[in-house]
Structure formats: structure tokens, C-alpha cells
Amino acid sequence: MYATLSTHLVKLPAARMEINPADSTLIARVAKRDKRALELLYDRYAAAALGLAMKIIGERNVAEEIVQEAFWRVWKRATTFQVGRGQFSAWLFGIVHNLAIDELRRRRSRPATMSLDLEDDSVIDIPDGQVDVAGSVFQNVQGEQVRAALTGLPEAQRSVIELAYFEGLTHQEIAQKLGEPIGTVHTRARLALQKLRELLIDLKVDAL
Amino acid sequence: MEAHLRTCAPCRERLREARAVINLLPRSVEPMKPSPDTKRKLMARVDADLAKNRERVAIAPSLWSRLFSPQFAYGAAALFVAFLAAYWFVSQGSTQNQVAQILSNPNAQTRTINGTKEMPGAQGRLVAIPGENRAALVVNGLTPLPENQTYEFWLIKDKPIPAGLFRVDANGSATFLVNSPENISAIDKLGVTIEQAAGEPAPKGPMVMAAGL
């Protein structure tokens, strides 16, 4: 039926092709309320964000809510993101991390009432200092490299890093959990970060 | 510590390095593909947000400018115009609210509609609540048209049924309410064509989006 309609074709400029636009381009478009740009960022990072949320919270439906909420906050707060002061991926993962850790702490303090507080804006205004690094490595670094570096840490050091980052424990809480003096935890954390950095450099992970 | 960091470059550098490492930790976990429902819910929230803002930005200023413009500031004529403007405001608001309700309805069903070779970058979806005759069409990636042309949406069952004219914003996006003469679920196919500004009772122009054809 419509085949004949093409004979009436109006000359139009070709639709703009979106071939792998940079994160900085996309987030600038999101700030102008371009939902297609948000969709592209979602397609690019949702799987990594869900992996992170799952690692922290361990419950699929809650992790999916966290991912949805994180991208919603990206949509609502894109105008506050300053391209020159940090990378989008670090900002996004910071939001996901904070949402997941907040939920984890909420569960620890109130285990009977488990729900994601979607109205809590506490993670929106992450200080720039917390997101001003990592650079474009998130685009380029293979996850295997980072996993290999973590695996390369001595067990005692790795557990301190994992308890701090993925379980949101303070050094004091880690010391209690491991039954170690807090000074030992401080030392292990410092050595772990130092060793991790060296391992990542050895693995040719740049931007460190 | 912050005071110390302000004056100690080596410590600032060590902190920067530590943060760089910490920011890499999310990459150490295995990615997991989210369910399509997560994306659908997110985009529904975004669509509802856009619809709400269009209402606030596009409709409210127009009403106030009508109410307070000098030519309408006299006696009964002004009151009459104010009445008409208020009626228009309410009806437009109602339309936007209906779109927002559809898009945020958890039972809504979505059909995708894609750009044809005439406009391959176009994407869209028709969101409908089962059993209802109304739906919301959400499109993006369409090229803005000159004033003398419009996009026309077609519901196709046996023959094309004209289902509304729309224009897109500068980003190529549009969201509008579709009122169907019959249950949306019974519609087989969808299409979007480019027509003259007044629209056509049957499609004449090039088809730029299609589903099920």
C-alpha cells in the first residue's frame, strides 16, 4: 500500500546518525532535556551500574530500582554536572554506589523495613572532589584488568578494600568485623590502594 | 585534613591517586543486563516529566500573556477572552495529564515504531492501557518540518485511520495523546507520514515510521 507513497517523497536531510557519541556530548544533551541522549547513556552504562548495585545489595529487584533511580537523578541533575571537573561514568557510579550503600545501611539499622528511599536526595550533590578522577578509563579499561589487579592483592588487603567499598564499612567497623586493631586496618587500606595502583599501572591501565 | 591538603601538594597528589584507584573499583564487578522493564519505567518517568514541563512552560505563560495583554484588558470582552483562555488551559492541561497518566501506568503496554529508510534514525513507541481507546505516542529522531508540513499518525486496520497531526521540537521529539475509534489492542499496524499542514484523510506523503507493515 505504502510503496506507491514513496513516489511523493519530500526531500529531507538525512537523519543525524548517532555513532558512538562521547559521554560529555550526551550528558550535555541530557542537560538540554534530550531523552534520546539519556537512553544512549543508559544503554552504555546500565549493565555496569546493575553489576555494581548487585555486588553491594545482592538483591536483583532492589538493584534494578537503584539503577533506575540513578539514571533518573542523572536526568534531573544533568545541568549540575560539570564536564571539565569529572567524568560522567565516575559521577554515575558514584550515585549508584551511594544509593546502594545507603540502602545497605538502612537495612542494617532497620532490617525489618526494607525499601529503597527514592526521595532521598543525599547522593545527588556528590562533591566534585569525589568524582573528579578516573577519567575516561571507564570507557577503555577492561573490567578483567581491574579484577585481575584486585585478585593480585594479598587476601588481607583485598578484604579491607572490599569491605570498605562494597559493604560501606568504616575502618572502625572493619576493625571490629575482622577483630584487628584499627591501626592495622588503616595500614592495610593504604597498602592495598598503593599496591592496587602499582598493579593497574603494570597492567597498562593509564589515567592513574 | 582539608586545611592540610590545601597547602600540601604531595598529599593532594596521593589523594588524587587513591581516588583514581577507588573510582576504578566499579569496573571490577561483572556487568549484568537489566530487565527491559527497568528501562521502560525510567523512560516513562522521563516522558511524564517532559509532558509536565511542556504544560508548565508552554501553556501557563500563554494563558497569563493572554489575560494581561493590553488588548484584552477591557470589560466584558476581556472577561470573555479570559474565560476562553481558561477553558483552553484546562483542556490542554487535561490532555497533558492524560498523556502523563498513560506513560506512568504500570499496566501500560508498549509497541515500538521505527523509522523507515526515509528516516532511519527515528524511534518511537505507542503506549496504551489495555482495553482503552487512548494511547500516548512518543517519538524522537524525527526531522523538524517546515511550517507547511506536518507529521500524521495512522492506525491501520484494514485501512489507515488518521489518528492525529503532530510536530516535533528542535530535538526531533514529540509526545501526544492518540484517541482511537476502537480499542488500541485491535490495531494491527502503525504508520507516520509527512503530509501538508492540514493533514490528509488518507496517507499521501512519504511514510517515515512504521510498525507491523
Image: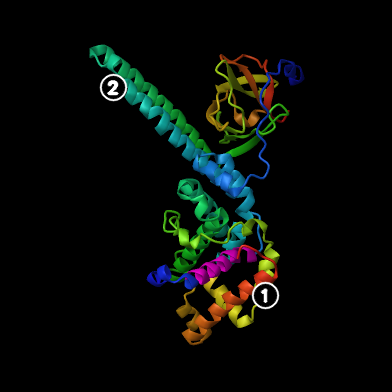
- Residues at marks 1 and 2, common chain? no
- Which mark is on residue B68? 2
Q: Amino acid at mark 2?
A: Phe
Q: Is residue B87 above or below residue A194?
A: above
Q: Is residue B156 above or below residue A23?
A: above
Specify whether residue B3 is painted magenta.
no
Q: Nearer the viewer, residue B78 or A126?
A: A126
Q: What is the chain letter for disc 1?
A: A
Q: Amino acid at mark 1?
A: Thr
For the point 65% across and 22% down, the residue is B193
Using a 10 Å C-alpha cutoff, classify the residue at mark 2 as few (fewer than 14 neighbours), some (14 to 19) or many (20 or more): few
Image quadrant assignment for residue A153: bottom right
Can residue B198 be seen by looking at this rendering?
A: yes
Magenta span = B12-28
Where is residue A93? Give x, y as percent.
Answer: 55, 59
Image quadrant assignment for residue B163: top right
Specify whether residue B19 is painted magenta.
yes
Disc 1 from disc 2: Cα separation: 70 Å
Q: Quadrant of the N terminus of chain B?
A: bottom left
For the point 36% across and 28% down, the residue is B61
Where is residue B105? Give x, y as percent.
Answer: 52, 41
Q: Which residue is mark 1?
A: A151
